[in-house]
Image (cartoon, grey):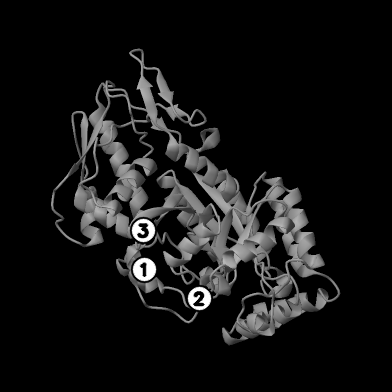
């Protein structure tokens, strides 16, 4: 609970965005009751001492507390907005070979801090300052996640392969050969021969579904929904028909287990007007319900422009803000936040659920072929998300099976699930997590009674005593 400034009109829109973001991530619910004795927040004109990220973090973002008041520098809000809003990337004209904004254009990569959720950490600093300023005043924090859980995790899967599996086995065999992975190449060849006449992709999907069911986990599956051609297959884009019997079998099994299904946007969605809406409309009858989420294939995204197209197509959230060639927090947050549109200087009606870990970021781009090392990296980032009571979003591709060139991957996936569960994560689909975070973000305290009773606009959001 906190009383935000009565008027923030002197702030630029990006600064207002950052202020609302900090309050939300800090779990400080705004208080509308003018008579309530609660902590007040003020925005100061303290000048920036440096534009270096290291200087800001060393200075705890300049956030200060006195009796009953917390102060945040306006300059800090501007810089936090640039990080969480991917402003540098939205303004960049640089492209990599897939048309993506290169990671080197990212604010945190340039500062070599991409493995730290620095915006979430700034919100934690604001929360601690509010607690210090409270004294005898009433202060309650919004619960971080449902069921009393202190942090959350989302297991997601990109369905890139359904048909033509022997072709992918050959491509992977060649990749392992180039890397000098003779042992894994030999095991891949043997597994591929043993899988002839079977469907190893389906077996991989079924194994994932069984393991998640055993842990009572609901995951999120992103499905390609365009028409494959020889050209799209050569580019690694569309490789299967969503209406095929094999795809329908997979989608039916996913639905039956209660998982969420979203769109895996084809390459054309980034460049072709209206393609998002076409692919979403094609997917929803097959998915048996609305496709609320989207993630770009190969994370092929132009921040801002692509997000505007997603919002226009009616998506609720996007989960594309991640690095293809490394793992980390591309927006500096371990959470779900509104997408900032730098061109329109306003948040879009679209949330970002950024990816912070992906299996193939290590194997494909960094040459790390040991799945145990992938999982160790994922759990290290999960610990960083847990430290800020945030959200870890990971990608595990269901085609990582022995017959397609990943002999040790299935056991590593089981280790990943065990690690997240044992660490106490609230594990469910991104659809459910986004709905919960939108509800929590909407909460406001409308009145505080003399005996401490509180009226909240979002009754489904619990307010808990702070752990001082």
Where is residue 366? Give x, y as percent.
49, 75
Q: Which mark is residue 365?
A: 2
Q: How far apart are marks 3 and 2 (CA)?
A: 26 Å
Image check: 274 left or right of 247?
left
Q: Name the residue under label 3.
A: 85
Asked whether the viewer can see residue 434, the reply is yes
Give the class, few, some or many, for how many residues have Cα within 10 Å of label 2's Cα (few <14, many ≥20).
Answer: few
Q: How many labels does the image show?
A: 3
Residue found 73% across the figure and 71% down from its top: 241
Q: Distance between the residues labelled 1 and 3?
A: 9 Å
Position of residue 142 relative to residue 152, above or below, is above
Position of residue 315 relative to residue 95, above or below, is above
Image quadrant assignment for residue 371: bottom right
- Which residue is nearer to you in this view: 428 or 460? 460
Position of residue 86 relative to residue 179, above or below, is above
Instruction: Tell me the mark number nearer the camera, choosing from 2 and 1.
Output: 1
Q: Name the residue under label 1.
A: 89
Quarter of the image with the N terminus in it: top left
């Amino acid at each position: 609970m906190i009383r935000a400034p009565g008027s923030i009109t002197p702030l630029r829109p990006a600064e207002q965005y950052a202020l609302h973001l900090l309050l939300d991530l800090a779990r400080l619910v705004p208080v509308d009751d003018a008579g309530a004795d609660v902590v007040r927040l003020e925005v100061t004109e303290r000048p920036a001492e440096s534009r270096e990220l290291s200087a800001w973090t060393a200075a705890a973002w300049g956030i200060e507390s006195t009796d009953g008041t917390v102060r945040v520098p306006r300059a800090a809000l501007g810089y936090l907005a640039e990080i969480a809003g991917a402003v540098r990337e939205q303004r960049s004209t640089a492209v990599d070979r897939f048309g993506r904004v290169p990671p080197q254009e990212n604010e945190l990569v340039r500062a070599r801090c991409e493995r730290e959720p620095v915006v979430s950490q700034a919100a934690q600093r604001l929360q601690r300052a509010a607690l210090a300023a409270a004294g005898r005043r009433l202060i309650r924090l919004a619960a971080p996640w449902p069921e009393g859980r202190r942090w959350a995790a989302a297991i997601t899967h990109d369905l890139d392969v359904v048909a033509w599996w022997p072709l992918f086995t050959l491509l992977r065999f060649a990749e392992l050969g180039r890397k000098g992975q003779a042992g894994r190449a030999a095991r891949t060849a043997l597994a591929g021969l043993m899988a002839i006449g079977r469907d190893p992709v389906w077996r991989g999907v079924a194994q994932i579904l069984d393991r998640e069911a055993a842990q009572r986990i609901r995951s999120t599956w992103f499905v390609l929904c365009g028409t494959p051609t020889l050209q799209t297959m050569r580019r690694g884009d569309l490789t299967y028909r969503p209406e095929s019997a094999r795809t329908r079998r997979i989608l039916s099994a996913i639905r039956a287990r209660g998982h969420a299904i979203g769109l895996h946007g084809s390459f054309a969605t980034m460049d072709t007007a209206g393609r998002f809406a076409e692919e979403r409309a094609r997917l929803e009858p097959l998915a048996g319900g609305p496709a609320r989420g989207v993630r770009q294939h190969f994370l092929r995204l132009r921040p801002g422009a692509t997000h505007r197209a997603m919002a226009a197509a009616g998506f609720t959230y996007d989960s594309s803000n991640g690095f293809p060639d490394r793992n980390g927090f591309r927006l500096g947050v371990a959470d779900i936040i509104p997408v900032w549109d730098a061109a329109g200087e306003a948040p879009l009606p679209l949330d970002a659920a950024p990816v912070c870990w992906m299996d193939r970021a290590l194997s494909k781009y960094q040459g790390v072929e040991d799945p145990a090392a992938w999982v160790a990296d994922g759990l290290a980032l999960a610990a960083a998300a847990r430290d800020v009571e945030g959200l870890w979003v990971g990608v595990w591709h269901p085609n990582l099976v022995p017959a397609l060139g990943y002999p040790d991957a299935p056991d590593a996936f089981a280790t990943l699930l065990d690690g997240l569960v044992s660490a106490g994560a609230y594990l469910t689909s991104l659809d459910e997590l986004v709905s919960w975070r939108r509800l929590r973000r909407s909460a406001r305290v409308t009145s505080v009674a003399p005996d401490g009773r509180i009226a909240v606009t979002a009754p489904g959001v619990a307010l808990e005593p702070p752990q001082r």
